[in-house]
Amino acid sequence: MNIRASWWEKYKSYILYAVLLIIPILVMDSYFSRGKITYVWNPDGWGQHYVALQYIRDYQHKIVNGILHGNLYQIPHFWYTLGQGADPLTTLNAYDFLDPISWISVALFPNRLTRSYKLMIWIKIFLSGEAFCLYTNYIKMTDSWRTAMGGLLYSFFNIEYFLYFPNFMHGCYLFPVILWAIEILMQEGRKAPLAAVTFYSLLTNYYFFYSNVILSMLYLCIRLLCKKNRAIENIRICRNVCVAYLVGGLLSGFVLFPTVHAFLNNYRIGLTTGYIESLIRYPLSFYKQLFVHLGNFHGLFAYHTVIGGIPLGLICLFLLIMQRGNRWKTMKIATVSSLLIMCIPLCGRILNGFGYATNRWSYAFALAVAIAYVGLGDKLCKLEKKQLIFLTMMVVLYMGTAYSIGGNSSDGYSYDVLLVLTMLVLWAVNTIPLCKAHGNLILGELTILSVIVGICVIFSPAYGNFVKQFVSVDGLNAYFTTPSISKARGTANQKEFYRVEKRETNLNVECANQVRGTTYWWSIMDKNFQRYCTDLQLNTLTPNCGLHGLDGRRALLDLAGVKYYTTDSKDNEGVPVGYKKIREGLYENTRYLGSAFLYKNSILRKDAIKMNPLNLQEAMLQGVVTDTKIPNIKTIRPKKRMTSLPYRLETKDVNLTKNRIWVKKEKGAIILHFKKPMKGELYLWMNGLKIQEADKSMCSLIMGTSSDIWCRGQKKGDLRVSDYEKTSTALSSYHYWYAPKDGETCYLGKSKEGYESVKIVFAKPAEYTYKSIGVYENDTEKCREDVSKLTPCRSISIGNDTVSGNVECTGNEMLFLSIPYSTGWSAEVDGEKTSIVKANGMYMAIPLTPGKHHIQLKYSTPWLRAGILTSLMTFIGVLIYQIVRIKNKPKVTERKSEE
C-alpha cells in the first residue's frame, strides 16, 4: 500500500496533466473536425512541414525495402526532388527529419499523413506540459495539482505559433528538460542527463538547441548568482555543464557536423541587409503591442513574438512584484530577463544565429510565467486585503493603459471579462470562508476554464477564426495532386533524368508526385543558390528562402535540364519559347539539352555580373560562368542578346520622374507602349528599383510595407504582369527578413503573340527610386545558334548519389551538369581524381581534355564521415569512462568505510 501511495505521489502531477489535457485538445479539435479542416497551415504548413512528413515516409519505405532486399547502403543521401537537388539530412533537420516523434507518427498512419501531422502536434503539446512537470517536481515548488495546472498553462501559451510551425515546438518541450538536467548537475553532480538531452536535441533540431543553450546558460548564471556559492564551486559547475554539452554534442556528431556545415553555407547567417536600424531598441510600436499582448489570448505579433496566456498568469506577474526576500529573487530575475531578451533586437539576432531579429523563443517567458503561477499558488489563496487592493489597482491600470495604446478587442473582450472574473474569484477565495476552504481547487478550475475560453477565442469563427487559416482535406489533396504535374510523370521516360517547371505556385509538391522540379522552399537555402537567384533577379524568389520556379525563362530552363513545362491554366498562359504542346496543360522542350552537355568556352564571373540579368542569362548559353579562369578553356566576352525596345510612356495616378516613382493611389499604373516585336521573348526590367519607406518604424510590424507590382488579365495589345509568378514584390531594405535584389525582372511572354504594351499596376501607394525602366526582346534565332554549339551528353546517367557515363571531347571542353554544386560531390575522370568547378553560380562542371573519357561522380554528405567517427569515438570514450568509474567505485566506498 505504501509503495502504491508513493508511486501515486511521485507521478500524480504527470497523470493529472495528461487527463486535464484531453479537455482543451478535444475543444480545439472540434473546430477543425467540424469543417473537415486539417492541422496544416497555409502557407508554411503545406509548403514545408507537411512535405517534410512525406519525405520521412519515403525514407521509411526506402529503409524497409533496403533491409528486405539487403541493399540498405543504396538509400540516397542526395534527393533531386528537394529543390533542384539537396541533402535531406541537412535540409530537413530543422523539419523533424530525425525526430522519433515524427517517425512514429508517420509509421502509425503512413497512408493518412494528415493524422500523422495531427498526432505529431498533440504529442509535442503533451510533452511540453510533461517537461514542465518534470522540472517543477525536481525543484519541489508546490503540490501536484498546481504543477499540473502550470503544465497546462505552459503547453497552451504558444498554441497559435505551434500550429503554424510544428517544428518550433522542439524548443518548448526540450527547454524545461534542459533546465531539469542542469539542476541535477548542480545538486547531484550527474552530467549524464544533460549530455543525453543535448544528444536528443541535436538529433531532432539543431536550431532550437542552439537557442536553448544560450537561454539555459543565462538561467545557469541567474541560479549561480542567487545561490551565492564560492567562486571555485561556480567554476566547477560551469565546467561540468560545458563538458555535458560537449559530450552530448560530440555523440550527435553524425548529425551535428553536417548540419553545421550546411548552416555555415546558408546565406542567412550574418545577414546584414534585414531590418533593424538599432541593435538596442525596436520601434515604439513593438513595445506597445508587447504590452497589450500580455493581456490577450491572441499572442502572435511582430518578429514572431508570442505573448499570450491566461488572466491568472498576468496576475501572478503583478503579485511577483510584491514579493520580498531571496526566495523570490531567482524567479524575478528569470522573468525580467526572459522578457528583456524579447525587447532587444541584438538578442533576437544572436538567438537567431546572427541572422535577422526574431523572438521564436518566447516560450522562455511562458516558462517563467507558468513557474510564477505555480510558485505563488499558495499566496493566491492567502492574500491580505492590502494585496488584493494592490492587485485590483494593477489590473485596472493595465486594462486602462492597454485600451489607450491599442485595446484588447481582437479577442472580443473575452480576456478582459475573464480577467475581471478572476479578480472577483480571488476576492471570494480570500474573504469568503466557504471559498477559502477550497481555494486551491477553485483556482485550478478557473485555470482550466481560462485555457478552454482562450482556445475558443483563438479558434472560434466568432472571434479569431484561427481555423480559417488552415487547409481543408480537399484543399490539401488538390495542392499535392496538381493535374499537370501528374501528366508530366505519366508521359516521361522515368529512367531519364529531367526536370519540370510548373506555372502553378504549389511549392515542394515534387516529392508527392515523384518528379524533379524547380521550386524550393526550405529554411536552409545554399548561398550559391540564393546568389544565382539574386544575380538573375528571379522574380519568383520570395523575401527569404522560397523559389517559385525559374520564371519560365527559356535559357534558365535549358541550363536546369527542364524538359517539361506544365500548367493547369485553361488559356495556357506563359508557356516559354521553344516548348511544344504534347497534351492539354503539358509542353515539351523542343531543344532539350539534357542534364549534361559540353561547353567550349568560359566566362569569368567578374565580367558576367557587369551585365544586366537578362543578358547574363543568355551569356550562360555562350560559355560556362566560373569564379576563376579554367586552364586550357577559352575565355570569351559574351555577346548581348537582348534588344531594348523604344516605348511611349503613360501613367495613371503615378508621378514619374527621372529616378523616382510616386504611386499616389491604390492600383496606380505605368503603361509602356511600344511597336509590336516578333523575334522571341519579351521582358520587363526595372533596374535598381527600391521602395522608400514613409515610416520606417512600421515596416517590420506589418511584414514590410511592400508594394506588389501586379495585374490580372491578358489580352492582345495589352500585356500585363500576370497573376503570381510574374507578381513582383519590392521590399524595403528595412524589412526584417530580406533577400536583396537590385531591381525587378519579369518574363512577359512570347513576343510573337503581338503585344504592344506593358501595364505595371502598383497595389499600394508608395514611393520608389529606380535607375531605368525598359522593355527588352530576346532574339530566338541567335539563342538557337548558341544552344546548337553546346554538345548534349546523352550517355551520362544520374542515379542515387552517383553520376557516371562516357564523354567524347573534340577539344578542351567543360562538362556541365545541371546538379547543384556541393562540396559533398567528388569526381573521377578515367579513374583519376579531378576537381569540380562551380558553374554558372550554382551548378557543377568538370574540365576535360580532347578524347574519350569515363566520368564518375559520387556524393557523400559533407562532414558526415567525420561526424560518424566523432560519434563513435565519443561513445567508446564514454563507455570506457563509465567502466573505469564503476570499477573504482567499490574501492572508494571501501576506503570511506575503513575511515
Image: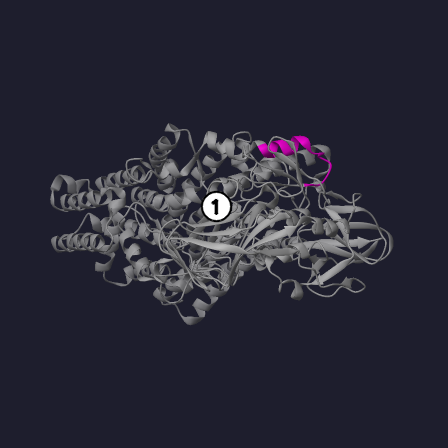
Considering the numbered disc 1 on the image, is that residue within a helix, a strand or a loop?
helix
- Give x and y (percent) for residue 93: 56, 48
Quarter placement of the N terminus = top left
Res 527 seen here:
yes
Instruction: Look at the image and give the residue range highlighted in magenta.
Output: 484-498
Q: Quadrant of residue 122?
A: top left
Q: Is residue 591 left or right of residue 662?
A: right
Q: Foreground: 687 or 21?
A: 687
- Give x and y (percent) for residue 269: 53, 60
- Give x and y (percent) for residue 420: 18, 45
Q: Foreground: 612 or 280?
A: 612
What residue occupies the far right of the structure in this picture?
A: 851
Q: Foreground: 188 or 579?
A: 579
Q: Which residue is mark 1?
A: 167
- Give x and y (percent) for residue 37: 42, 32
Q: Is residue 260 left or right of residue 356?
A: right
Residue drawn at the location 59% of the way across and 58% of the way down: 535
The colour scheme applied to this rendered structure is: one colour
The relative height of residue 672 versus residue 38 in the rendered view (above or below) is: below
Q: Is residue 577 left or right of residue 652?
A: right
Q: Is residue 487 magenta?
A: yes
User: Which residue type does callout 1 highlight?
Assistant: Asn
Q: Foreground: 333 or 505?
A: 505
Q: Is residue 581 magenta?
A: no
Residue drawn at the location 69% of the way across and 45% of the way down: 561
